[in-house]
Image: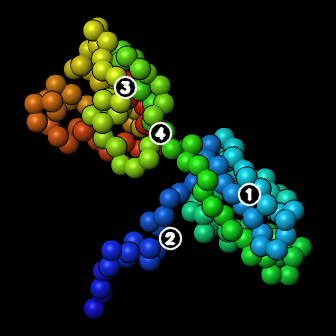
Amino acid sequence: MLYLTPFSFLYADDTSHYKIRQGDILDVSVWGDDTLVKEIRVLPDGRISFPLAGNVPVAGFSSSEIEEIITKKLKKYLPDPEVTVIVNSTDGNKVYILGKVNTPGAIPLQGPMTVLQALSISGGFDRFADLSEIKILRGNKVLEVHYLNLIQGENLESNYILEANDTILIP
């Protein structure tokens, strides 16, 4: 029988953990070696450079997966490296709002956020905004947002949960 506690999330498998993105900042250290301690920003190509390990792909991996990758690379030089990776900043976890809003730009995603929540952060619409044509660009997909229906409590499925790098367009 499975018992859930308020802390059950601590025991979830690794696929539920935060995945590193370009722009995030990591603290990487090897226990017992002060020369192998670095704060590193993930590069646009999704890699970091770490002494002795070289260029390491990290985007899309959890911190524990990155610890394993770096540990394997360091075993060539150190007998039993104890690697720790801590996510210091999730700067790569942003959505963007463009177009006829009062405050366009990047919004950090610090948890689940819907389109309506992001639009409220943008400070409202310009008086020339076309509220019937709001869209989300997600990779190579275009998602239609039925804003005028949403504010009347209809078409709630178009109040999408945003993902990192989504762009909301307000024409």
Closer mark to the observer between disc 1 and disc 4: 4
What residue do we see at 50% from left, 59% from top? Answer: 18
Q: Label 3 sits on what residue type?
A: Ser
Q: Is residue 139 visible?
A: no
Q: Residue under label 3, please give it.
A: 122
Whole-percent x, y for residue 28 in the image: 72, 61
Which numbered dot is residue 56? Answer: 1
Which numbered disc, 2 or 4, marks the residue that appears first in the sequence?
2
Which numbered dot is residue 108? Answer: 4
What residue do we see at 72% from left, 71% from top? Answer: 83
What residue do we see at 44% from left, 65% from top? Answer: 16
Whole-percent x, y for residue 151 in the image: 15, 30
Q: Quadrant of the N terminus?
A: bottom left
Whole-percent x, y for residue 87 in the image: 60, 56
Between marks 1 and 3, how big is the CA–CA gap? 36 Å
Q: Is residue 137 visible?
A: yes
Which numbered disc, 3 or 2, marks the residue that appears first in the sequence?
2
Q: Label 1 sits on what residue type?
A: Val
Between marks 4 and 3, how big is the CA–CA gap? 12 Å
Label 1 neighbourhood size at 10 Å, few (<14), some (14-19), many (20+)? Answer: some
Label 2 neighbourhood size at 10 Å, few (<14), some (14-19), many (20+)? Answer: few
Label 4 neighbourhood size at 10 Å, few (<14), some (14-19), many (20+)? Answer: some
Between marks 2 and 1, how big is the CA–CA gap? 19 Å
Q: Residue under label 2, please give it.
A: 14
Which numbered disc, 2 or 1, marks the residue that appears first in the sequence?
2
Q: Label 2 sits on what residue type?
A: Asp
Label 3 neighbourhood size at 10 Å, few (<14), some (14-19), many (20+)? Answer: many
Comparing 97 with 122, the one in front is: 122
Which numbered disc, 1 or 3, marks the residue that appears first in the sequence?
1
